[in-house]
Amino acid sequence: MNPDMNDEAAEQSTAEQKMAGLERSTATPRDLVAVCSAQVKEEPAKRAGDTEQSTLPPSRPEETSEWQIGGRTLTSRFFLGTAAYPSPQVLKDAIQASGAQVVTMGLRRQLAHGTEASDFFALIQATGSHLLPNTAGCHTAREAITLAHMARELFDTSWIKLEVVGDAHTLQPDPFELLTAATQLVKDGFEVFPYCMDDLVSCQRLLDAGCSVLMPWGAPIGSGQGLVNPGALRTLRARLPGVPLIVDAGIGSPADAVQAMELGLDAVLLNSAVAHAVDPVRMARAFKLGIASGRLAFEAGVMPRQDMAVASTPVAGHPILL
Amino acid sequence: MTTTDTEPKTITITVNGTPEPTSARTLQAWVDARGVLPAALATAVNGNFVPRSLRAQQLLAEGDTILTFQPIEGG
């Protein structure tokens, strides 16, 4: 990085220009949106309900543009966890309210007996969601690799949210064990979704290993702190154009999700913020709207912040009477 | 004490961290003896994943460890 670039705004500006391959004099927020939205399909000229007389643009208040990940096309950019809900019914209702098309699940080391596990699995399957099993609780690459293979067999999917914890207090990913596991799992035919730090170089190494998507943390798991380092996420977005980026962990409120989406990240994965809400179902809907809003704002091009006031009303050529 | 060829010999294995005597000689036999649906759990022996299709060939010996996993909620 340029040593002169020691503030966030400068970093953003430079990164955007590098990403778009544009000269400093011509780069604009619209260019950033154009590059990062390359996978967004054209909006249909007309949608159901439009009338010939309508002059308003088509609206899609709760939808986001289609995107592709792991061989699948999604319309939702909300990945929802399934842990810690008050009841199976609340979980089911929250998934429905969220509009999420991908839900995460885990594995527990225990002997399967009774119907509890199968009932839960059946409930999730009935939602029609894509499954993203995780390797939560693993501390070494070997553990994670073994658990990933188990998950593929149990859930019948090659998608795996790869978690390798490096610190018991922060639950921070271990970048070295993570890379080792990702490298092997890619060779084993998995679509690896690595839960990783927001460090650019380690993210690049994961891509080199064959990962096609990254899931940088927003903050420690379950902390609800939001995006503790938006500058790092902005750098990832700028330096890794075209790579699906999903903010995973730390999201506390819909405002955090809006921020992530406005930064141009492709999706948000969260669990606790919904499951621990007073009303998880309503919170799931709140996040759905927030994520959609943030994405629309990104695609529309959020205006750049200014240090000083900039008059909205043009005054040039107007008579000044005082 | 001696055992005959027809008398099942009991070995001790560790299942999910708990010692357990068993007369099963293969992982498949052990799973079958537990009465669980074979598809309801994933298995590893001595830390190595054993897919369903290979459970019958996976021999068990004294001191082996078995890990079994099942789906749960997760974030």
Image (cartoon, coloured by chain):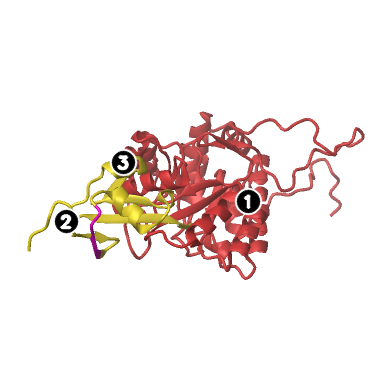
- What amino acid does circle 1 point to? Ile
Secondary structure under the numbered disc 2 in the rendered image: loop
Viewer-nearest residue: A179 or B23: B23
| Chain that the image shows in yellow | B
User: What is the x, y in percent for residue A257?
Assistant: 58, 54
How many numbered discs? 3
User: What quarter of the picture does the N terminus of chain A occupy?
Assistant: top left
Check disc 1 and report its element: helix, strand or loop.
Answer: helix
Task: For chain A, give the colour.
Answer: red
The amino acid type, in three-letter code, at marker 3 is Leu
Cα distance between the residues tagged 3 and 2: 19 Å
Tell me the chain of label 3.
B
Q: Percent position (x, y) of residue A240? A: 47, 37
Q: Is residue B21 magenta?
A: yes
Mark 1 = which residue? A291
Distance, label 2 to label 1, CA atoms, is: 54 Å
The residue lying at 7 percent from left, 64 percent from top is B1
For the stretch drawn in magenta, the main secondary structure is: strand
Q: Tell me the subunit letter for badge 1.
A: A
Q: What residue is shown with label 3?
A: B54
- Comparing marks 2 and 1, which lies closer to the viewer? 2
| Side of A310 relative to B48 (left or right) | right
The numbered disc on residue A10 is none
Kindly check if marks 2 and 1 are in contact, taking CB atoms under 8 A apart as contact. Answer: no
- Label 3 or label 2, whichever comes before in sequence order: 3
Q: Is residue A165 visible?
A: no
Q: Which residue is mark 2?
A: B62
